[in-house]
Image (cartoon, rainbow, N blue to C red):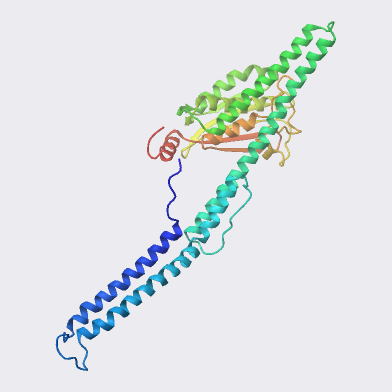
Amino acid sequence: MHGSPGLSARLKLTLSYAGFLLLTSALLLAVVWVFLLRHVPDNSKGLLGISPNRYLLLHTFVPAAASALACLLVFGLLGGWLLAGRMLAPLTRITDAARMAGNGSLSHRIRMKGRQDEFRQLSDAFDSMLERIESHVAEQQRFAANASHELRTPLAISRALLDVARKDPTRDRVELIERLYAVNGRAIDLTEALLLLSRGDRGNLTPESVDLSLIAEEAAETLLPLAEQRRITLDVTGGAAHTTGSAELLLRMVTNLVQNAVVHNIPDGGTVTVHTEEYDDTSVLRVENTGRRLPADLVPTLTEPFQRGAERVRTDEHAGVGLGLAIVHSIVRAHEGALDLTPRPAGGLLVTVRLPAASQASSRRVDRTGGVPL
């Protein structure tokens, strides 16, 4: 709801400048009266001589003082208006940039020059905010386009299979159902991954105390049959590593890392090691696997949604949707942690997750909420 229009900041500053100047002048005249005129003898009832007296000074000083005050008022208004306009010019540029951003132009930057005053700091902060918003919007648009493409693929396959079945009633229905089931399962997995990724990006966490070592053991136990099928040795080492966050999201994070390490452990017969430890107010999770050598320029792209590196060989059974490490990155970021991916010289990948320890994570959340624990 908009309120009634009021005076502009420039007019308020102008009136303030003029009023201050007028008040200062009036005080100066009062000082002249108190310390000068009251000591001059009053000869208004007698004959006036050539020497100064109060009557003469009042009749000559007061009109001149009133004229001076009027001139000072006009000068204060004009000078204040110009001075306020000059002082508020940077704020006008910031306002114009904010209006352009509101209309959808996020590429505009103020880039204010000059000394580091309050307006320059506000301008730099606004430019940084616009840069982050533009990057976030571009990332969301790219993500939406990729998600639409990925979701359209299984739907198109399902439609093609149904068209074939409609045109060819003699086609094997068992085979058709199996293919439709597989395509539908892939679409469901992709949808669930997108919802989980969106949840991690929003950072809506239910804080609770979590031990990464217990989560690592649970994820390893779940994926042990897959590792045994591929003749891969899966080990969990280390000690307790307590943090605060969503146990469900952290379990999905560890599960994705271990599953990626198993699936991409080509050729079969390699090893996957999951290690947890806690030191210096930091809980650390390391997932290391053998496998093919990864190019250094490929590793930074692995956390991008729908990025499937050429060297990341997958089987049909675990084809994935290209969101495994993207989800991991989103969950780590939601827990204020850090994710590092390092290619092993002998082949394979070392993934290191660093999260604030339980006490450190709780204090950070208290700070963000103004001293009220979540």
Compared with 124, 306 (above or below) is above
Q: Is residue 285 visible?
A: no
| Residue at the far top in the pictured view | 170
Q: Is residue 104 visible?
A: yes
Q: Is residue 303 above or below residue 187?
A: below
Q: Nearer the viewer, residue 63 or 357?
A: 63
Q: Looking at this view, is 111 or 369 the one in front?
A: 111
Instruction: Answer with left or right where residue 187 lies relative to residue 163.
Output: left
Q: Is residue 140 left or right of residue 37?
A: right
Looking at the image, residue 65 lies above or below residue 129: below
Q: Position of residue 161 (x, y in %)?
A: 79, 15
Quarter that holds the C terminus: top left
Residue at image location 62% in from the left, 40% down from the top = 137
Give percent across and percent down for residue 101: 59, 47
- Residue 260, above or below 12: above
264 sits left or right of 8 in the view: right
- Horizontal side, residue 52 vs residue 212: left or right: left
The single residue placed furthest to the bottom in the displayed view is 50
Percent x, y for residue 188? 66, 19
Residue at 83 percent of width and 6 percent of height: 169
Residue placed most toward the observer, 173 or 85: 85
Specify the quadrant of the image occupied by residue 224.
top right
Quarter holding the N terminus? top left
Q: Residue at x 56, y 49 (%)?
A: 99
Q: Quadrant of residue 310?
A: top right
x, y percent for residue 192: 62, 23
Q: Nearer the viewer, residue 230 or 93?
A: 93
Task: Say how many tags the image has.
Answer: 0
Residue at 55% x, 57% y is: 93
